[in-house]
Image: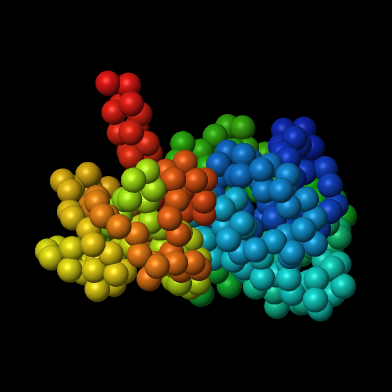
Amino acid sequence: MSDFAKRLIAWQKQHGRHDLPWQNTTDAYAIYVSEIMLQQSQVSTVIGYYQKFMQRFPTLASLAQASQDEVLQYWSGLGYYSRARNLHKTAQRIATDYAGVFPDDFTVMQSLPGIGRSTAAAIASFAFGQVQTILDGNVKRVLARHFRVSGWTGSKKVEQQLWQLAESLLPQQGMVAYTQGLMDLGATVCTRSHPKCAACPMQSSCAALQANCVNTLPTPKPKKTIPQKQTTMLVLRHGEQIMLEKRPSSGIWGGLWSFPETDATDDLAALVQTRFGLSANSQAPLATISHAFSHYKLSIQVQPMHVAQRSSHVSEPQYSWLSLEEANAAGIPTPVRKILQLLLAETQTKKST
């Protein structure tokens, strides 16, 4: 066992995290759900979502049998919704092709939707005790600093170098503590900013610490100008209800319910008549909401419109008329939830005056 692994395992047993909801189990499904949620989200954010998700979908079979709408509803607000769609697809694939039993074959795992090498390694390690290395963002940072690896860790060349390092450090025993230790060290000690080097079990061998360059590693991603996009969301209201439109299954917010969008800035009444067969009048714009994606920023103009009469043209399954409360409980993206919160607050104010 490498000295790195020995120190890490000892540190994790004494100082690591041991009471997270998905720990202290070998249930591959529970571990799988947590790993998918943690791919793009912080532990503190994931805990609440994980607990609610597992309460509703306690088994792989229950997830496989659910509708995508309901899965997205329980994911709503966590973002990166392709994770939820892939989670659902994988559950259905396992139910169909593997008799509902999560496969323990490392290669097979990576063939399932949304499971890459690092996620498969975490499942293999925690659920099956296999000797496989993870390499998520936290681990890349730990290795880049400890071994003083320069260059952006997202580049193919540097990432390959880090995979080789990670593989060379693997112990043959204590994989659960070792894998969890890598996660814990990156998340709680070797953090992106203000790392706690004095508390690090690797301080005596950390090349970046010895060279006084901890704060410059890992090398930042080359900066690009983030484009700014604009859209208008139409809040079509009829009495106490609003209309939501189901988005295409792929792309941004795929499969979620949202307000209809348009790039048009004028003659919205004609657009609504043509597109939905509804007679509607524009009201004063409600607000402008900003939302940042990983690759662009979106500015959303919120345009309320009063619908005089509902039309049979707007019907299930692509469109749905809901109360504000029902819409707020549906599978919706974060900006839509923000708009609904504004509408609910506005309604509450009117009722109290």
- Residue 196 in sight from this viewpoint: yes
What x and y, as percent, mark residue 14? 77, 32
What x and y, as percent, mark residue 126? 80, 54
- Left or right of 134 in this view: 287: left
User: Residue 87 falls in which quadrant of the image?
Assistant: bottom right
Which of the two residues, 32 or 287, is positioned nearer the viewer here? 287
Which of the two residues, 57 or 317, is positioned nearer the viewer here? 317
Q: Residue at x 52, y 61 (%)?
A: 81
Q: Residue at x 29, y 28 (%)?
A: 350
What x and y, as percent, mark residue 40? 53, 55
Q: Residue at x 80, y 76 (%)?
A: 96
Asked if 197 appears above or below 282 in the picture, the reply is above
| Quadrant of the drawing holding the N terminus | bottom right
| Quadrant of the drawing holding the C terminus | top left
Q: Residue at x 38, y 71 (%)?
A: 313
- Left or right of 212 in this view: 272: left
Which of the two residues, 147 or 130, is positioned nearer the viewer here? 130
What x and y, as percent, mark residue 219? 42, 58
Which of the two residues, 56 or 132, is positioned nearer the viewer here? 56
Disc tally is 0
- Residue 11 in sight from this viewpoint: no
